[in-house]
Image (cartoon, helix red, strand yellow):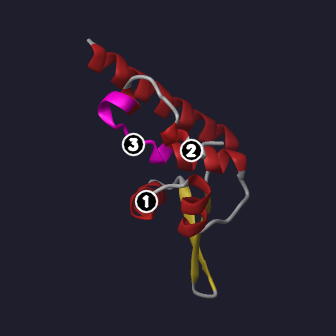
């Protein structure tokens, strides 16, 4: 869904301000696989994202209650801790804020 998104030409914020799309990548991954338990390694490989940046964002999302955290046989995994509707609203809010940021920086 977002694989290679940084290689595409994105207008505005991403090109001009190097806007971080890691949060959006996590949201879109969770929309595509809402019931999947995943590790940071799994998500980093799937999204082609820097693992360190991804781990920081996952920790932020976990502390906000958006993602849950579990452990099985010593492997830490994460899962969506919100409904699909809540995730859709979070994604729409992120995109709205991104758009407003872009408009504000063009002025």
Mark 3 closeness class: few <14, some 14–19, many ≥20 residues within 10 Å: few
Determine which quarter of the picture holds residue 36: bottom right
Mark 1 vs mark 2: give the one in front: 2
Determine which quarter of the picture holds residue 51: bottom left
Secondary structure of residue under mark 2: loop
Query: Is residue 83 something that shows in the picture?
Result: no
Instruction: Look at mark 2 in the image and give the residue it sits on.
Output: 4
Q: In terms of sequence position, does the residue under pointer 3 or pointer 1 come before the other?
A: 3
Mark 1 closeness class: few <14, some 14–19, many ≥20 residues within 10 Å: few
Residue at image location 62% in from the left, 36% down from the top:
88
* Image x and y of residue 89, in percent: 58, 34
Q: Is 83 on the left or on the right of 74, as rendered?
A: right
Write the start and end of the magenta stretch as one range. Answer: 15-23
Secondary structure of residue under mark 1: helix
Is residue 22 within the magenta segment? yes
Checking the image for residue 63, the label placed there is 1
Q: Quadrant of the N terminus?
A: top right
Rendered position, 48 above or below 76: above
Q: Quadrant of the C terminus?
A: top left
Task: Pick whichever, 31 or 67, lies toward us.
Answer: 31
The total of numbered circles placed on residues is 3
User: Alpha carbon of mark 3 to alpha carbon of mark 1: how far?
Assistant: 19 Å
Q: Is 48 on the left or on the right of 100, as rendered?
A: right
Checking the image for residue 20, the label placed there is 3
């Amino acid at each position: 869904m977002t694989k290679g998104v940084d290689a595409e030409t994105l207008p505005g914020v991403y090109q001009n301000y190097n806007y971080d799309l890691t949060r959006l990548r996590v949201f879109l991954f969770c929309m595509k696989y809402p019931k999947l338990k995943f590790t940071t390694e799994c998500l980093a490989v799937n999204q082609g994202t820097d693992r360190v940046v991804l781990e920081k964002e996952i920790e932020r999302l976990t502390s906000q209650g958006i993602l849950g955290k579990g452990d099985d046989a010593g492997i830490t995994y994460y899962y969506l801790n919100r409904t699909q509707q809540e995730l859709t609203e979070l994604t729409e809010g992120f995109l709205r804020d991104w758009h407003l940021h872009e408009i504000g920086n063009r002025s």
